[in-house]
Image (cartoon, coloured by chain):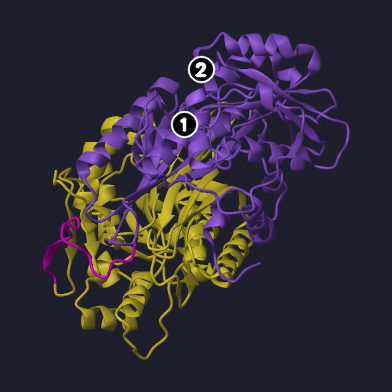
Chain colours: A yellow, B purple
Amino acid sequence: MEEHIKLYHGDGGKHTNALINELFYKYFNNEILLSGMDSAIFNTSIGRFAFTTDSFVVKPRFFPGGDIGKLAVCGTVNDLAVSGAKPLYLSTGFIIEEGFSINELQMIVESMGKTCQEIGVKVITGDTKVVEKGNVDGLYINTSGIGIVDKNYKSKPLQPGDNIIITGSIAEHGTVIALKRYDIKVKGDFKSDCGSVYNITSRLAPFYSNIKLMKDPTRGGLATALNEISSIMGHRIRILENNIPIRNEVRAVCSLLGIDPLYLASEGRAILVVDAGMTQEILLCIQNLDNGKDASIIGIIEELKDNIVYLETKIGGRRLLHTLDTPMLPRIC
Amino acid sequence: MEEHIKLYHGDGGKHTNALINELFYKYFNNEILLSGMDSAIFNTSIGRFAFTTDSFVVKPRFFPGGDIGKLAVCGTVNDLAVSGAKPLYLSTGFIIEEGFSINELQMIVESMGKTCQEIGVKVITGDTKVVEKGNVDGLYINTSGIGIVDKNYKSKPLQPGDNIIITGSIAEHGTVIALKRYDIKVKGDFKSDCGSVYNITSRLAPFYSNIKLMKDPTRGGLATALNEISSIMGHRIRILENNIPIRNEVRAVCSLLGIDPLYLASEGRAILVVDAGMTQEILLCIQNLDNGKDASIIGIIEELKDNIVYLETKIGGRRLLHTLDTPMLPRIC
């Protein structure tokens, strides 16, 4: 490992994985942690609980479609949701810079409260720290969450032929943050997809025995999430470029900025790996929901177990979708 | 409220309470949160769970008796322990500054792992964010924790005559941090009390029906914790200055620095309010433990319900122990 932390250690790619494997897994070694999923699952005599944590350091704190508060609630709720859990309780940890506007803090907390109410989750414990001016960039929020896992949901070994569904168009959050960061004014309706996917995952409960795995493509985007799936579950993954829902405006901006949308975060989407035989039923169920109308079958699990994710491009070529190993710009974590 | 966040909004005193009451309680309004205890308690069909969160921003990160990692584990474990819970699982959220030493990070994570092992708690989920240089002061850690509450433990209404016990000598953590902050070299064995109190609270299980309340006197120290108890549970509290265990070296340094040790954090102590009739048995049980040998009966619950905490001084006078309303130095949160 290097001697100093670099920005790319937080990008969700290769270097983040190295840090997790060589440092955190070494000293926090236990079976639940090592499962490496979006939430930790622990058993009790009444069933399985999901537990997850995430810190939010996004700049700008307000963006079309959301703000750091909404993001902090949805991010943790979604980690629980894609673990097959009903989100129950959240904690919030605020680290605030001296001099921060109380009016802005109020807008953020109000947004969190509203989002919680819409989803039906409660903040039941919290902590606030204030640090000297210059010791934090405005405000960072940690949310941890607890949910109860549906008794019929369990991630399962993948089978060749399983289909991969994405619940909506990708890279919208990352694109909005990029536009704001670079202060680029473009025409078009740009809005982060920041939102809860629990309405989708809960509606899918009747299909839980046919869903192998769920994951949300946040930091590092769709490509990173697929690589994680491939590396944890084995199996090569084929992705059909033609089938990936990306809005035209998003595609245009990414092309303008020279960014690959496959590596840009979504904050209100889920990836599902599902039984081939039930794919259409599951897809229809998702498409019936407002935030699922653009759901699409984007790929398939192949037989080879070489942890490779590749893209079948529009013109019929093949491109490896590697794990991020160079600094990702814009930084939108 | 003011227009901007001040350092004292994080001191755990009057201004922190105002922020919590006027902002967080307003938008996160629910019964569990409003109970205002060290952990949130939620019911399930197999019993009650405790859930708590804390962010750690201490400087220096290494100090005699501990480091930010040990503190981050013990702080959250102790919040669970004083809720009558057995700590089970922790989450960790790291926010790290670009350029941070990986060697130092490793020392911190190793210390966390070792502390977890000693206590018997597991880190089962985590998150790592890296932010640009200058956007965080080195490294901040959030830990959230889940525990299962002993079926015999419940905080209960206080009665006049109930005794108040402190499990050990106070203000040692705060004193060590003050010495480091001001770079003061003094002779004497100064060491933070940073440690778990779960070995004490678990040993007290046979007495849980006689324990009304437990709380750890961290941010804002003993005086702040007593004020919280008084304001949540009602009742005037009388504290006997003579009985408060403070090591001579700590007293001397506080006097030198002009700091009141009653407002300095302990990070390995608990306050207990107990039935008068069982006080001696409980005290003996604590004193039998290494980290409880200096336990002492420091006060009594009085009949009046005016939320006042006062000190009966050594020379027989009375002094109000108010809630902190001026900036606390050194900042040791």
Q: Is residue A35 above or below residue A163?
A: above
Of the two numbered discs 1 and 2 on the same chain, state the one appearing first in sequence. 1
> Is residue B181 shown in magenta?
no
Q: In the visual, does A116 lie left or right of A234?
A: right
Q: In the visual, does B245 lie left or right of B238?
A: left
Q: In which quarter of the view is residue B46 placed?
A: top right
Residue B151 visible in the displayed image: no
Q: Position of residue B188 (x, y in %)?
A: 39, 24
* Residue type, label 1: Cys
Residue B48 visible in the displayed image: yes
Quadrant in the picture for the N terminus of chain B: bottom right
Residue that sits furthest to the bottom in the current view: A187
> Is residue A327 shown in magenta?
yes
Q: Give the residues in magenta.
A: A316-333
Q: Is residue B167 above or below residue A276?
A: above
Q: In the visual, does B119 lie left or right of A23?
A: right
| Residues tagged by mark 1 and mark 2 found on one chain of the structure | yes
Q: Is residue A171 above or below residue B279?
A: below
Q: Residue at x 62, y 65 (%)?
A: A114
Q: Chain of mark 1?
A: B
Badge 2: residue crowd in 10 Å (few <14, some 14–19, many ≥20): many
Q: Position of residue B170 (x, y in %)?
A: 55, 28
Q: Helix, strand or loop at disc 1?
A: helix
Q: Residue at x 24, y 50 (%)?
A: B100
Q: Nearer the viewer, residue B260 or A157?
A: B260
Q: Chain of mark 2?
A: B
The residue that mark 2 highlights is: B291
Q: In which quarter of the view is residue B147 placed?
A: top right
Characterize the magenta stretch by its predominant secondary structure. Answer: loop
* Residue type, label 2: Asn
The residue that mark 1 highlights is: B74
